[in-house]
Amino acid sequence: MSETGGEPEATARLQKLFEGHRLTPTQRRIAHCVVRRAADAPFLSSVELAELAGVSQPSVTRFAVALGFDGYPALRRHLRDVVPAAEAPGEGAANEYQQAVQAEIDNLRHLASLLADPEPVARAGRLLAGSRPLPVLGLRAAAAQAAGFSYFARKVHPDVRLLDEGGTLLVDRVDAAVRAGASALLCFALPRHPREVVEALEYARSAGLTVVTVADSTFAPVARHSDLLLPAAVGTGLAFDTACAPMLLGRVLLEAMCDALPDAQARLEEFDAKAMARGLFVE
C-alpha cells in the first residue's frame, strides 16, 4: 500500500497539522508514523497506531491532545478530512518479509515525489561541492550511509573527511575541518538518534558551518540544528530499520555535487584510467 495513498499533497497537509506544536520525541515518532502511513492512519485504532509507532497507547492519546484535539477519536476524524479518501486497508496475503520490501518501495515512491522539486537537492549539491574540506558525519545506524557517501565522494571531491566515531574527539575533528576551510557539513541522521549527533550539529553551526542533513523525517531531533534538511523515510517493519531511501538520497546528493564540480568528470576518468592500469577490478 502506498505510504501516502498516491497523494504527496496529503503528506504536506499532515506535516502542516503538526507544525507549530512542541512535540516530545515520542510524539514526533507518532507524527512520523502518521505521515508514513497517511493512507492507513484514518482507519487505525489508537492501539494499532501505537504498535506501528512502537509507543504505548496512552502516548497516542497524549499526542492527540497535544495537537489540540479532545482525544484520539477526534484526531482520527480530522485525519479522514485531511487525507484523500481511500479504501480501508484489507487483509493481504503477503508475509512479513514481503511487507517490509513493499514498505521500502513505498518509501522510494515518496522520495521520488519529494524530488519533483529538485532545487533543495541542487542547493545541497552546491553547498557540498563548495566546501573544502567536506566533513561527512554519521554515527551508529547512520555510519554506513556516511561511509558509502564518502567512499564515492572522494572520487570527485578533493578532500572528504568521514566523521563516523563519536566521543571527545568528534568536536576536535569538526574544529580541524573548520580551520582547514570547511564551509559546510553533511550529516546522515537515522533513528535512534544519538545525542552526540544533535550536539555535534549544534556545535558545527556555532562554528560557522552550514549543515545539510539527510534524516528519516522532518520531525527528527536534528531538524532544528540543520540549515537544509532532506527527508527520506526508513522502514520499520523488521527488527532493525531499513534505509533504502536514505541511501538512494545520498547517491542523488552525490550526483548533484558532481554537477556542481566542474572537474568531476575529469577526476572520474582519471580514476578509471588508473584502476585499469593497476588491474584493480576483475570485470
Image (cartoon, rainbow, N blue to C red):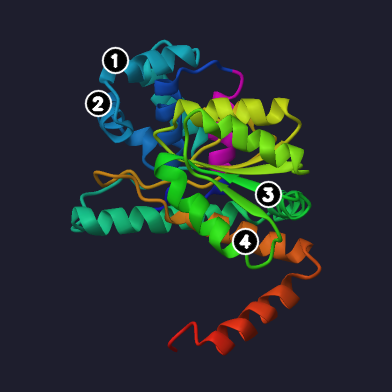
Q: Marks 3/1: CA distance?
A: 44 Å
- For this view, does 222 lie left or right of residue 281? right
The CA distance from mark 2 to mark 3 is 45 Å
Q: Please name which of the two marks, 2 or 3, marks the residue nearer to the observer.
A: 3
Reading the image, the residue beneath label 2 is 47
Residue 251 image offset from top left, x and y in percent: 57, 61
Q: Which mark is residue 58?
A: 1
Q: Which mark is residue 134?
A: 3
- Residue pointed to by mark 4: 153
Mark nearer the N terminus (2 vs 4): 2
Q: CA distance from mark 4 to mark 3?
A: 9 Å
Q: Is residue 12 magenta?
A: yes
Does the image show residue 246? no
Give the prevailing secondary structure in the magenta stretch.
helix
The spot of residue 219 in percent (x, y) is: 52, 30
Label 2 neighbour load within 10 Å: few <14, some 14-19, many 20+: some
Amino acid, disc 4: Ala
The residue carrying pointer 1 sits among few (fewer than 14), some (14 to 19) or many (20 or more) residues within 10 Å by Cα, namely: few
**Range shown magenta:** 9-20
Q: Is residue 140 above or below residue 267?
A: above
Secondary element under disc 1, as helix, strand or loop, is helix
Q: Are marks 4 and 3 in contact (CB under 8 Å)?
A: yes
Nearest-to-viewer mark from 2 and 4: 4
